[in-house]
């Protein structure tokens, strides 16, 4: 909830009605394109299934995430993971690029990298000022410029080219983080809240174990906290319970299989830990508003929008109180 008691807004892109992100959704625009329309201020909000990475080349401002505030000045690199409540206040005239990736697209990129440091590079929110003479700055500027060029050109191999440039961006970001970690050894830096740090540990654990349908208690035990503590952190940071996040990960993998493979429903369900194909179908339908077969047919036909009356926010997330599939 916001300070005045209203629900935290959810948007597609800021100021646009909430919608379901396509698995391979990518968008890039300049900071002024949207911020001039909103007086350079972004009120606290979240995006389900969309993350942001910003390269600020002129100006500066403030980023607020989970009651933690970062002040940044150009040149700066900023990361805002999906589902995190965040807000911005840019100095008028600030310039740079805003890259928005769906969890499906980013997940595909991360699945192809070999180093854990690259997978962790954008897992937590941050705003890092870059030294004007930093050797990494030109690499970031090239990566963002190349992504923007591919995004607008619609050439053959567009998605693969953008994924390659995102990978290069991750390499540079991981190197920056490693260098900052070494430089910050022995001195205090801008911290992250315990809730955000706990969520950063939970996400890779969900990626590793979601097919096993662990109960919340087992995730909590693996992280060394109580289930109540874990659920409270999940709700404060993302607005969803631990179980909802686990089920959203199951749904993401199910949609990938339905979209990019020819596997049958029973095979997909079994690979996701469902012994009963009928139960997998009910699980999927409850959260998407369509059966697995209907979802696949819609994608084969080029459609993607869920029907009215689908799941919570239409993003594969449970309504409160939903039970585990096993």
Image (tube, grey):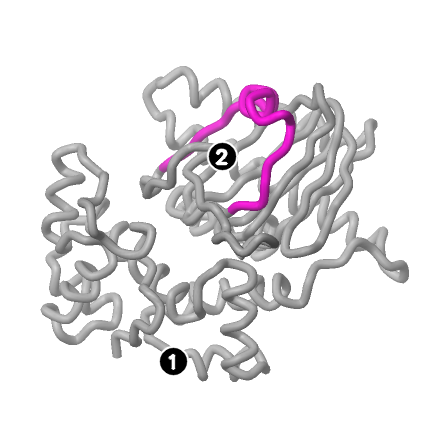
Q: Residue at x 55, y 20 (%)?
A: 33
Q: What residue range appears in magenta?
A: 25-45
Q: Residue at x 50, y 22 (%)?
A: 148
Q: Using residue 10 as the reference point, say whether residue 317 is left or right of it.
A: left
Q: Is residue 38 magenta?
A: yes
Residue 238 in picture, x, y percent from top left: 50, 58
- Judging by the rendered image, the residue that carries numbered circle 2 is 14
Q: Residue furthest right?
A: 186
The answer to which of 274 and 109 lies nearer the viewer is 274
Residues tagged 2 and 1 counted as in contact (Cβ below 8 A): no
Residue 303 in picture, x, y percent from top left: 18, 35
Could you tell which of marks 2 and 1 lies nearer the N-terminus? 2
Q: Is residue 13 magenta?
A: no
Q: Identify the secondary structure beneath mark 2.
A: loop
Q: Residues within 10 Å of mark 2 (few under 14, many from 20)?
A: some
The answer to which of 93 and 254 lies nearer the viewer is 93
- Judging by the rendered image, the residue that carries numbered circle 1 is 215
58 is higher (above) or lower (below) than 313: above
Q: Residues within 10 Å of mark 1 (few under 14, many from 20)?
A: some
Q: Residue at x 32, y 21 (%)?
A: 156
Q: Identify the secondary structure beneath mark 1.
A: loop
Residue 271 visible in image = yes
């Amino acid at each position: 909830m916001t300070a005045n008691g209203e629900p935290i807004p959810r948007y597609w892109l800021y100021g646009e009605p909430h919608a379901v992100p396509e698995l391979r959704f990518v968008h890039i625009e300049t900071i002024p394109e949207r911020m001039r329309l909103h007086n350079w201020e972004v009120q606290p909000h979240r995006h389900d299934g969309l993350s942001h990475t910003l390269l600020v080349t002129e100006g500066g401002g403030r980023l607020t995430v989970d009651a933690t505030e970062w002040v940044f000045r150009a040149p700066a690199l900023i990361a805002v993971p999906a589902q995190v409540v965040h807000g911005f206040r840019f100095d008028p005239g600030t310039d740079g690029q805003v890259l928005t990736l769906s969890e499906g697209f980013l997940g595909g990129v991360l699945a192809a990298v070999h180093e854990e440091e690259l997978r962790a590079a954008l897992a937590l929110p941050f705003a890092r000022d870059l030294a004007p003479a930093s050797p990494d700055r030109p690499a970031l500027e090239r990566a963002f410029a190349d992504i923007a060029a591919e995004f607008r050109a619609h050439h053959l191999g567009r998605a693969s080219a953008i994924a390659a440039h995102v990978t290069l961006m991750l390499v540079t970001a991981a190197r920056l983080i490693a260098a900052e970690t070494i430089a910050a050894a022995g001195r205090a830096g801008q911290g992250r809240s315990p809730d955000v740090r706990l969520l950063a540990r939970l996400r890779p654990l969900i990626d590793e174990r979601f097919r096993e349908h662990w109960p919340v208690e087992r995730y909590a035990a693996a992280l060394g906290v109580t289930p109540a503590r874990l659920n409270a952190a999940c709700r404060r940071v993302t607005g969803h319970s631990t179980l909802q996040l686990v089920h959203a990960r199951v749904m993401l993998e199910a949609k990938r299989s339905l979209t990019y493979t020819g596997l049958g429903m029973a095979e997909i369900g079994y690979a996701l830990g469902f012994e009963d194909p009928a139960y997998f179908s009910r699980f999927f339908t409850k959260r998407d508003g369509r059966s697995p077969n209907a979802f696949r047919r819609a994608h084969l036909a080029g459609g993607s929008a869920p029907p009215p009356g689908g799941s919570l926010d239409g993003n594969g997330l449970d309504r409160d109180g939903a039970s585990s599939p096993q």
